Image (spheres, rainbow, N blue to C red):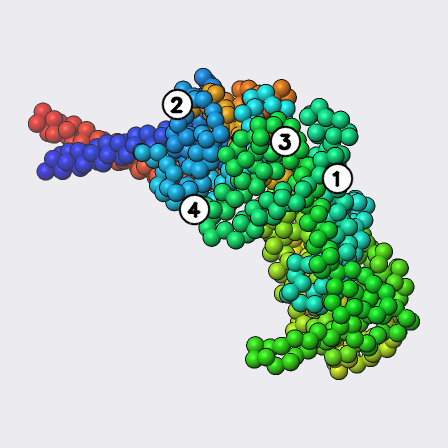
């Protein structure tokens, strides 16, 4: 029985040892797998250290601090007009040269009748191409690649109408665009400082048109009236247009100076221009409006309604631009006689088109005036007589009342930007008076800066235009709202430095008043600075470091103010006066794109919308980029030959790879530690089992020896 028990025990221990050795082998295999995993992630991390990315870098596109902005590569950046690509397409092409189009562009190309091998370009085809991009009247091929969704249009209906409405030769189809035409300079004028802005003759050196205030006092019926200053500016512009038209007739039409100067508008042609303008204004729908616009544009160029030369006379192509320029000058002269607001000395005529600066401003001494500038009488909806009184203004220039009319009339926008120019009023409804006056001057200065005119001044593109619109609304709502006026103190001293209304206007970006309402003031300089600061806020969002605070001084309530105009290093992006209009830039972009699709053909690849796919395809040579050369043609280029495209180390990818490597390595290390602990336990158990096996084997051996010894005896 002892021998049998020992043998049974030996078998049990041996089985346990075999099981432990099997588990140990499994752990060794797991450890080998972890070692292989660590090698794999180490290789991935090593590869990531060499990761690169494309960066689009245009020195002329800067943030509000003047630093050039970097963009990631994308199909829309290459194939949509913007300042980043200088309004020239950088076309993605196959190795054969075919332009690679996403679904929207591919639908437009097919709708325009361009086969995948190319086609013959035409004005009709180009307009159909644009029509499909804008999705006008459900313009798309029989089997469209994208669903009908107005929100996904490449261009807006407004842009389509501008580019196809025959409103200007400059936006019509140009068969030479991208096909040898001299490249147009479509970049912005570059960055300028606040000093440059003040010295610019088209901005800072413009005089302040104080008659804008008088026009605003007259009310909505004078909203379209022009002031004497505006008239002089417009007359100079139209006179230049007339001179340019005559010069073109001489140079290109092979006419003498005498012939050019003898061209004059007769009454019948004057009436033809006028009749078409009235038809455009009174058109009942867009179809008729486009028809009349087309007829007027043809007439300006010496063409009839069908686009044929009038009287088949080639010289009419040069005479009619002279007729049009002369007509505009005559129209301006006629409008002046009908109601241009102008300065006059002495008593005012009873026609509301003259203003006396001695009534608009206090011009007799250094006291804050309490007189009345204008009392406007009208009737309400029920026919009752009502009157609106506007108080005479006092102009304060850096704490000093200015009452010399010559000094006041000669102030410029630059004076507003570099000084404190404050308007004050005394009497009933003085806050309302100042709100109306400041709003009129804000709108005037803003229009000089480009408000309402894309391509002019600071309004370099649609993004800037939207920012200006929002800046104007915010400035009027927050800064010029009489209900937001800051009221404190009761001092109404003629010494403005001791006048609480004046101090409130200087210390706060609001209308300042005294508690009794007897005085009010508004800092025109801070109004303009607020507008420019809001403009930057809307352009740059959370990246903007400037703020129109509630208070200007450290003692005031609310947030501190930091205007963009306070920063001498702030960079303003400015379009030069002779720059191409935004419409011209966009038209040239799509002309170049359309002409090259016709010349080289196209292929469809919806995946190009994915930036990673596009970057990979360009890097490995599957696709190339076609860019405009100095000779006016587009050529295929390797990405590292493009001026704006830079391949640089992808720090983000490296950071992500490092984080992933650290995490995975920690997980593997944790598992290895667990395996080490389990292996050590198994090794200890196997060692114990070996000892026990040896002990049992000794017992068995001795039992056998004892048995043989017993039977041998």
The answer to whether the residues at label 1 and label 3 have Cβ atoms under 8 Å apart is no
Q: Position of residue 142 (x, y in %)?
A: 31, 34
At label 4, counting other C-alpha atoms closer than 10 Å, the crowd grade (few under 14, some 14-19, many 20 or more) is few
Q: Which residue is mark 1?
A: 240
CA separation in Å, label 3 and label 4 = 44 Å
Q: Which residue is mark 2?
A: 116
Q: Nearer the viewer, mark 1 or mark 2?
A: 1
x 29%, y 32%: residue:
26
Q: Position of residue 475 (x, y in %)?
A: 66, 61
Tell me, for residue 151, which label it has, or none. 4
Q: Earlier in the sequence, mark 1 or mark 2?
A: 2
CA separation in Å, label 1 and label 2 = 47 Å
Q: Is residue 438 visible?
A: no
Q: Quadrant of residue 440?
A: bottom right
**In terms of secondary structure, where does tag 2 sit?**
loop
**In terms of secondary structure, where does tag 4 sit?**
helix
Asked if residue 248 is positioned above or below residue 442 in the image, the reply reads: above
At label 2, counting other C-alpha atoms closer than 10 Å, the crowd grade (few under 14, some 14-19, many 20 or more) is some
Tell me, for residue 642, which label it has, or none. none
Tell me, for residue 316, which label it has, or none. 3
Q: Viewed as shown, does residue 78 lie left or right of 528? A: left
Q: Earlier in the sequence, mark 4 or mark 1?
A: 4
């Amino acid at each position: 029985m002892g021998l049998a028990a020992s043998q049974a025990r030996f078998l049990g221990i041996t089985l346990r040892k075999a099981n432990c050795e099997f588990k140990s082998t499994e752990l060794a295999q797991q450890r080998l797998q972890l070692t292989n995993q660590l090698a794999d992630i180490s290789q991935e991390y090593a590869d990531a250290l060499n990761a690169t990315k494309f960066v689009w870098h245009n020195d002329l596109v800067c943030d509000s601090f003047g630093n050039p902005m970097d963009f990631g590569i994308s199909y829309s950046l290459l194939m949509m007009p913007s300042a980043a690509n200088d309004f020239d397409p950088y076309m993605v092409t196959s190795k054969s040269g075919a332009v690679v189009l996403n679904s929207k562009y591919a639908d437009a190309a097919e709708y325009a009748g361009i086969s995948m091998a190319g086609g013959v370009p035409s004005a009709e085809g180009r307009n159909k191409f644009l029509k499909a991009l804008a999705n006008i009247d459900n313009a798309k091929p029989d089997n469209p690649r994208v669903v009908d969704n107005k929100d996904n249009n490449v261009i807006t209906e407004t842009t389509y109408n501008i580019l196809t409405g025959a409103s200007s030769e400059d936006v019509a189809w140009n068969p030479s665009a991208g096909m040898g035409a001299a490249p147009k300079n479509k970049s912005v004028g570059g960055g300028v400082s606040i000093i440059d802005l003040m010295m610019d003759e088209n901005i800072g050196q413009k005089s302040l048109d104080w008659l804008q205030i008088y026009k605003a006092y007259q009310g909505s019926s004078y909203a379209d009236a022009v002031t004497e200053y505006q008239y002089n500016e417009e007359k100079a512009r139209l006179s230049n247009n007339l001179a340019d038209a005559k010069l073109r007739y001489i140079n290109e039409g092979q006419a003498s100076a005498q012939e050019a100067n003898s061209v004059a508008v007769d009454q019948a042609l004057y009436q033809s221009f006028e009749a078409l303008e009235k038809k455009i204004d009174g058109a009942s729908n867009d179809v008729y409006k486009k028809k009349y616009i087309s007829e007027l544009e043809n007439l300006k160029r010496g063409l009839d309604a069908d686009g044929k030369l009038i009287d088949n006379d080639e010289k009419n192509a040069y005479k009619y631009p002279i007729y049009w320029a002369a007509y505009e000058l005559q129209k301006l002269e006629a409008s002046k006689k009908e109601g241009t607001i102008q300065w006059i000395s002495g008593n005012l005529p009873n026609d509301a088109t003259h203003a006396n600066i001695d009534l608009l401003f206090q011009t007799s001494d250094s006291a804050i005036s309490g007189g009345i500038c204008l009392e406007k009488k009208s009737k309400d909806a029920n026919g009752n007589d009502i009157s609106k009184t506007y108080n005479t203004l006092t102009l304060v220039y850096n704490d000093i009342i200015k009452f010399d009319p010559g000094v006041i009339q000669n102030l410029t926008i630059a004076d507003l930007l570099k000084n404190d120019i404050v308007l004050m009023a005394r009497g009933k409804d003085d806050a309302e008076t100042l709100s109306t006056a400041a709003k009129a001057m804000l709108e005037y200065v803003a229009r000089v800066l480009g408000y309402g005119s894309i391509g002019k001044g600071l309004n370099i593109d649609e993004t800037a235009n939207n920012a200006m619109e929002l800046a104007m609304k915010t400035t009027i709502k927050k800064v010029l709202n009489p209900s937001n006026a800051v009221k404190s103190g009761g001092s109404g001293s003629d010494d403005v430095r001791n006048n609480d209304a004046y101090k409130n206007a200087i210390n706060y970006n609001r209308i300042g008043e005294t508690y009794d309402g007897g005085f009010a003031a508004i800092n025109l300089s801070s109004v303009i600075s607020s507008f420019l600061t809001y403009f930057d806020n809307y352009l740059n969002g959370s990246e903007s470091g400037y703020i129109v605070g509630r208070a200007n001084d450290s003692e005031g309530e609310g947030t501190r103010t930091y205007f963009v105009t306070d920063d001498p290093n702030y960079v303003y992006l400015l379009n030069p006066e002779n720059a191409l209009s935004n419409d011209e830039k966009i038209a040239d972009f799509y002309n170049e794109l359309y002409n090259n699709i016709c010349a080289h053909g196209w292929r469809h690849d919806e995946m190009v919308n994915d930036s990673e796919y596009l970057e990979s395809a360009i890097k490995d040579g599957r696709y190339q980029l076609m860019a405009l050369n100095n000779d006016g043609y587009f050529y295929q280029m390797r990405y590292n030959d493009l001026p704006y495209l830079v391949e640089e180390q992808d720090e983000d990818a490296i950071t992500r790879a490092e984080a992933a490597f650290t995490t995975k390595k920690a997980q593997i290390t944790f598992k290895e530690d667990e395996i080490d602990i389990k292996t050590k336990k198994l090794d200890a158990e196997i060692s114990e089992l070996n000892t026990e096996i040896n002990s049992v084997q000794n017992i068995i051996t001795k039992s056998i020896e004892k048995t043989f010894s017993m039977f041998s005896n």
